[in-house]
Amino acid sequence: MRNRAVRIANFSGYLGDRRSAFDEAMAGDPVDVLVGDYLAEITMAGVSAALDADRQALAGFSVGYFLEQICPHLAAVAEHDLKIVVNAGAFDPAGLAERVRAAAAHAGVELDVAHVEGDGVLHRLEDLRAAGYDLAHLDTRAPLDELAGEPIAANAYLGGWGITAALREGADIVVCGRVTDASLVTGPTAWWHDWGREDWDRLAGAVVAGHIIECGAQAAGGNFAGFTRLPGMLRPGFPIAEIAADGGSVITKHGADEGAVTVDTVTAQLVYEIQGPHYLNPDVTVDMGSVRLRQAGRDRVQVSPVTGAPPPPTTKVAIYAPAGYQIGITTHLTGLDVEEKAGLLERQVRRIAAEAAVDELVVGRHGTPVTDPRTQDEATIGFRVAAAAERPEPLQRLSRETQSLGLSSIPGFMGVESAGPKRRIDYWPGLLPQEVLDHKTVLQDGRRIAIDSPKTEPFHGQPVHPEPEPPPPTPTERVPLGRIAYARSGDKGGNSNLGIWTDVPEAWPWLRAALTTSELRRLLPETENLTIVRYEFPHLRAVHFVLCGLLGNAGSSNLRLDVIGKAVGEHVRARLVDVPAALLAAAP
């Protein structure tokens, strides 16, 4: 066990994140470990869609540009004794590990590369189901037989102990596939501090730190609703977690980088993509209600030690299957009679779609033209068509014949742009007992270390938070909710989650009382027929909602404009609510 905190820096939050971030991390403040998160549900679905026609290519896919990022720095990684942990292995961690070894050998650099395997269970699905594991849908409980297509990928979420084992055996670089995002941090932290498998509170602290930094620049102000109050947001930096032996941490960033780390930028990440006060991880269950934040200096947020408990017996399995094809078609409407123009164009598009036998169709306009517009742009709004079908031909016809309306539709017809048809992939979350997974660490010398499943406890569900009483009557002003509150939203399969909090302490009693489930339905009419689950986080001054089914089956297959719900929070902040005038006076 080392006496000081381990410094872990993130350099990637998703597949497609800023490629120069690895260069920036190497040029930044000293750290002990660099972690890169490349995978997400929609990422795995996108890769599956692109490579569905070639099963061998899908099985061999890894994030090749990780090599481009690390190769110029291999000598420096060795010289500074840095540890690198990534999930860039995707569907082929063994293959990527071998390519990293070859690159190091070519550069004349001695680096020990290990990989973690066992997340891929596609080849085991039939046997697992025969053994009685039904892989029912995590949200709907529907049987796997209802999945429309034949699965092309199935990956279980692994914990961090395979990473820990690799580092304990001397690995410098650990390549993973589908481990949980936080595992990239818990694995190295447990190695650094020599934690045990049942150090629940410490492990919970590492999961919280990992959750905060896993999405790259978001913790340093990226995508933050209060971005106008932050300095230097052209290129916000990537975060660093300093995790102490007791599991407490400080979240910071490289000193020379832009952006900012504040209690609110960290809160935004804490309420992001969670499903309730109990945050489930394969290694530990975190009590999110025990998290406490404190600004400890410029760009330094102290996260107190938190409370953990044994993890649940099961872990999530992400299953992907083809579900036909989809297309997006856009054009623009300009000038007067926009309602009538949109109406005519929609009727024409719907006629074409019916004749082409399109299965699903969504038509909508986006924006409102300015009165007395000075420029043509001010007079213009968007018009979008999204459609899905079992085969690509109906969608190709829809695109072609919508384009052919050029001389027989609305005045000012600008033509259309089409994206697709492209493969549509359904996402299916199931559960498997951790004990049936073949979780292994494979070392550079070929040795294989079996990772035992953890001690677990049954999970009895999230707590129930009763609806609050209405706020007391007081003089109010009708203003956008964003005048008094921040928000952050995201996706978990077909659910969108929405966290809303205030940085005005006096406003918390009003916010929790005002944001009832019925009020959220008013603010978001499209949730009228959806199940909404509401939680409160008083220590964060936050109300959190899970909007079940808002995203259909998942971001990879719905036809919404905001397919993964990232802008739901910004929409809600723009809605008008009655806020006590005294609170508005206290707001910054």
Image: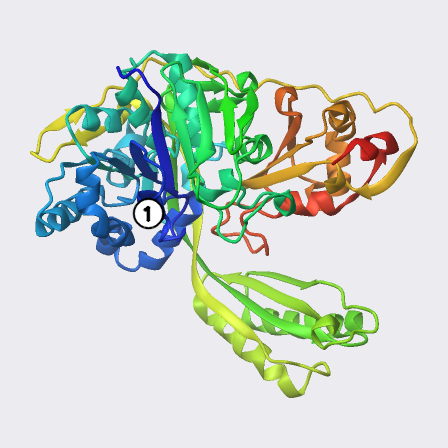
Above or below, 355 against 472 in this view is: below
- Looking at the figure, which quarter contains the N terminus? top left
Horizontal side of residue 247 vs 196, given as left or right = right
Above or below, 408 against 35 in this view is: below
Choose top left, top right, bottom left or bottom right for residue 429: top left
> What's the image's color scheme?
rainbow
Choose top left, top right, bottom left or bottom right for residue 356: bottom right
Q: Is residue 458 visible?
A: yes
Q: Amino acid at mark 1?
A: Phe
Residue at x 79%, y 26% (from the top left corner): 510
Check disc 1 and report its element: helix, strand or loop. Answer: helix
Q: Total marks drawn?
A: 1
Front residue (pair 196, 498)? 196
Residue 7 point in image, percent of width and height: 35, 29
Residue at x 30%, y 60% (from the top left corner): 53
Residue at x 19%, y 30% (from the top left corner): 441
**Residue at mark 1:** 22
Above or below, 320 against 503 in this view is: below
Front residue (pair 191, 587)? 587
Residue lying farthest to the bottom in this orientation: 407
Residue 173 point in image, percent of width and height: 21, 37
